[in-house]
Amino acid sequence: MPNINLDDTIAAISTPIGEGGIGIVRMSGPQAIEVSDVLFKAKSGKALAKVKPFTVHFGFVMDDERVVDEVLVTVFKSPKSYTSQDMVEISSHGGIVVTRKILDLIFKQGIRAAEPGEFTKRAFLSGRLDLTQAEAVLDVIQAKTDASLSVAQEQLKGSLSKKVKSIKDKLMHVYAHVEAFVDFPQEDLEVYSQKEVIEKIKEVESEINELLLSYQKGEIVREGILSVIVGRPNVGKSSLLNALLDRDRALVSDVPGTTRDALEEMIELEGILFRLCDTAGLGVFADKIDTLSMERTKKYLDQGNVFLWVLDSSEEFKEEDKNIVAMVKNKKVIPVLNKSDLPAQWKWEEVQKQFQMDVEPVLISAKNREGLSELEKRMKELVWEGKVTTEGIAVTRVRHKAALEQALIDLAQAGVVFQNKDSLEFLTFNIKAALDSLSELIGEVYSEDLLDVIFGEFCIGK
């Protein structure tokens, strides 16, 4: 268990830095209300220490006798607050100077600056949130579509935690049952004759596998579909990116090799987030920069979920096009025949026959923005037939997936021990290891390094 100090008081600006209608400075800890009373003069004359929790008070933040700003102060008292500590939120006029000035006055009272995610970390350490819920807070903040927000909100409600705890409870019954016989070694055969033990383990394995199956959905909803635009130089990859975005994001030129580095942008198609990546043209390496560009493009080829293979139908099917076939043939690929407004110089059926590709192309003119609706339709069809369901529980993070996979490994080994009728100590060891993995997933067991990694992703003030 890490040694983390919860007895000090922290403060941070919780709204984005810059000009805005409102700025919020928040404090959490035993001195939050006391320090606020030093700096805040309520119009009513009441001290914040004497007001009821969940109340808002109008007044002024003062620097000695000088008014810093006219503010509203919201008071939360332990244990019914976000962090389960006393909390104060000062809502001032938005702006860099005024919020910074209020924060500096707080620091002068001996209050410490909050680290990234420290408010949510305190909520976790106080037991108000478990670790999956704390991660969901960040997912809510970073949600880019209605679907990703819905999945994050479901996790924030504790749906994943409840499911994992339910699985743990079933496994704990098995563990307790077997442990009871460890004290009576002469009864080993009785344990191994009970079919319900192995049946219960199989039931738990089935439920874990069901959660793992949801990972693809969760990852896609949270991270989006990496859609890589590939093709030889000067076939219209950047023009396609601009057309799909409906704005000029990438530089377009008749000179081959204009795109020297990958560009990544996002679009949403009916709840599905697509991360569009315009890559450098795959062709002959002219210089060191070209070589580096090709290496980065090949990295995207390894990581991509969907590939938009752009070809120029107004020119002959070239050797570079043939080389790309091998790179995309066994992937989720949509051949995009660009410049369809010009006379075609070859037929796709010939490419299909030569390279045995069982996929139909989409004809577009990126320049005239023709055929884009059909392309978008095909892109959606590659992902659950264009529908993103946010119903049910979804595993959204690699950490969750790794913990579940480790639990399955331990349970599989427990099954082997059971079948071989090995020592009960081995059986309890494997079941306990699986329980530990599930406990780590929801944060019942954790390390300081793990918390640093998770909460380090947060912005300061959350």
Image: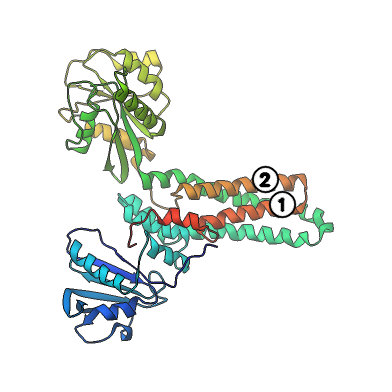
Residue receiving disc 1:
427
| The C terminus sits in image quarter | bottom left
Residue 236 picture quarter: top left
Q: Where in the figure is residue 221, as x and y percent of width and height? A: 37, 46
Residue 232 picture quarter: top left
Query: Above or below — where is 185 with respect to 343?
Result: below
Image disc number at residue 172:
none
Residue 144 in view: yes
| Residue at disc 1, secondary structure | helix
Q: Is residue 274 left or right of residue 62?
A: right
The numbered mark, 2 or 1, whose residue comes first in the sequence reads: 2
Give the residue at x 37% y 20%: 325
Give the residue at x 67% y 51%: 430
Residue 25 picture quarter: bottom left
Q: Is residue 240 left or right of residue 125?
A: left
Give the residue at x 32% y 23%: 288
Query: Above or below — where is 42 with respect to 255?
Result: below
Within-10-Å neighbours for mark 2: few <14, some 14–19, many 20+: some
| The N terminus sits in image quarter | bottom right
Query: Above or below — where is 241 with respect to 325?
Result: below
Give the residue at x 16% y 27%: 367
Name which residue type carries label 2: Gln
Residue receiving disc 2:
413
